[in-house]
Amino acid sequence: MRSTQFFLPTLRENPTEAQIVSHRLMLRAGLVRQTAAGIYAWLPLGFKVLKNIERIVREEQDATGCQEVLMPTIQSADLWKESGRYEAYGKEMLRIQDRHEREMLYGPTNEEVITDIFRNGAKSYRDVPKLLYHIQWKFRDEVRPRFGVMRGREFLMKDAYSFDLDKAGAKRSYNKMFVAYLRTFARMGLKAIPMAADTGPIGGDLSHEFIILAETGESAVFCDKSFTERDVLSMDIDYESDLEPIVKAWTTDYAATDEKHDAKRFETLAADRRLEARGIEVGHIFYFGTKYSEPLKAQVQAQDGQNVTLHMGSYGIGVSRLVGAVIEASHDDKGIIWPESVAPFRLGLINLKVADAACTKLCDDLYAKLGKAKVEVLYDDRDIRAGEKFAEMDLIGLPWQMVVGPRGAAAGKVELANRKTGEKVEISAEEALNRFTAAQGQ
Ligand code: 5CA
């Protein structure tokens, strides 16, 4: 993409309404714009990141055998009356009346709808276990929407639901999601720590929040330092095997949010192993047994001919929140530093002097070749000051910057800078090209 064509409305000044760094940077770097309190439009740069996060979530869900569906945003109130949650959910639910005065709502979560779909489709024990998920916008009329996309009213969530014959089966499904979550967040460059959690309006007696550490997090968290030292992605996972040992290994050491904090137990840790910090909840998983299947009569016929009520769990990831969370975890005073896996472009190509024929020719050539090799490049081909280009490139945080100036161009050389480490090397244009085209697919 050429900057002369790209819609990237960046802001020079810090927006006064933004209290935390991710919100400030998302507005300044032209990722989102607020259209109403807690409701955001995604601009091209932000939308690319959102899609990348969605892709990682999807790949890791698919790997577990979880199947993707798409349920509507608008739901009928009837199902919520059947489950008993219609009144209980309170003011966070956006209630709507259609022209026939039927009660509808904008879904804050989907336990009722998926249970209704499943009860109509599953008849026997052969139809379970099943795991289904979708990635869909939710609406919760939060009292205090704040921190940009971190606590929005409309937000994108991945929510998965499991259906099993009994509690032991449901725990197997829970474990699959648990492990998939570890991988999902690690692939985004995040260290997410599973913590025992309260279940709130979703309900149930087994639940973990996945929390990443960040100064601006909404909850105080306490954990063993070991969690920050683990390598998740080198684990070889077979989702059909018994995952309990992995889940055990990740739930034995101390980790709790303030709601569940046990100061006495925490103090038994050696002082240098105690980590007290703030955290952002990026995912939350629940096992709630028959809480919805019972009132909604989601049953299948067991092998002995008896009807059994299904055991269920639900598993959420804050997809849009993650865009903010990744920025909270990875930025400096100049701007965002995207991990390669979610970056909107892998590389920024900076033409320092558009008026210089050799410089522009080399840039055009590099841009064409990178494009051919399917490397995502933002090519700053605008006729503006170099300082402005550098500042914007740092602000939007692409992992690599390839800088071409008239002197280098005359010698066939470019400067390659890493946004994260600040390391710079001057290499031939050909070598620079090879680095990106050869490394594709890694
Ligand atoms: N039905 C269950 C799991 S599918 C559920 O709704 N869980 S939840 O309430 O914990 O939400 C799942 C995830 O959505 C949270 O972990 C969080 O990352 C994200 N989330 C929740 N509320 C908001 C919000 N107001 N703004 C942005 N993300 C949110």
Image: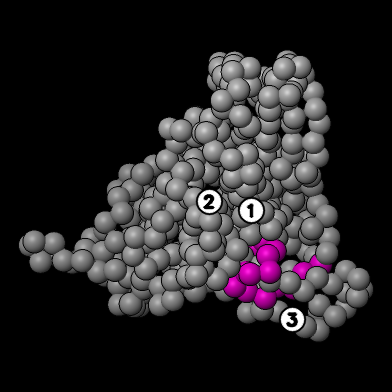
Q: Which residue is mark 3?
A: 262
Q: Quick one: label 3, few (<14), some, or many (20+) residues within 10 Å?
A: some
Left or right for 409, reference 148: right
> Could you tell me the amino acid type at mark 3?
Asp
Q: Is residue 196 visible?
A: no
Say how many tags the image has.
3
> Could you tell me the amino acid type at mark 2?
Ala
> Sequence-wise, which precedes: disc 1 or disc 2?
2
Q: Nearer the viewer, residue 222 or 103?
A: 222
Q: Which residue is mark 1?
A: 335
- Residue 157 numbered tag: none
Residue 260: say if magenta.
Answer: no
Q: Quick one: label 2, few (<14), some, or many (20+) residues within 10 Å?
A: many
Residue at 63% x, 53% y is 335
Q: Is residue 141 visible?
A: yes
Q: Nearer the viewer, residue 161 or 139?
A: 139
Choose mark 3 or mark 2, whichever is in front.
2
> Could you tell me the amino acid type at mark 1?
Gly
> Sequence-wise, which precedes: disc 3 or disc 1?
3
Secondary element at image label 2 = loop
Relative image position of residue 60 (x, y in whole percent): 58, 41
Q: Which residue is mark 2?
A: 29
Residue at 30% x, 50% y is 72
Q: Residue furthest left?
A: 100
Q: Is residue 353 above or below residue 35?
A: above
The magenta stretch is 204-224
Q: Nearer the viewer, residue 164 or 338?
A: 338
Residue 125 appears in which quarter of the rendering? top left
Look at the magenta stretch and give its main secondary structure.
strand
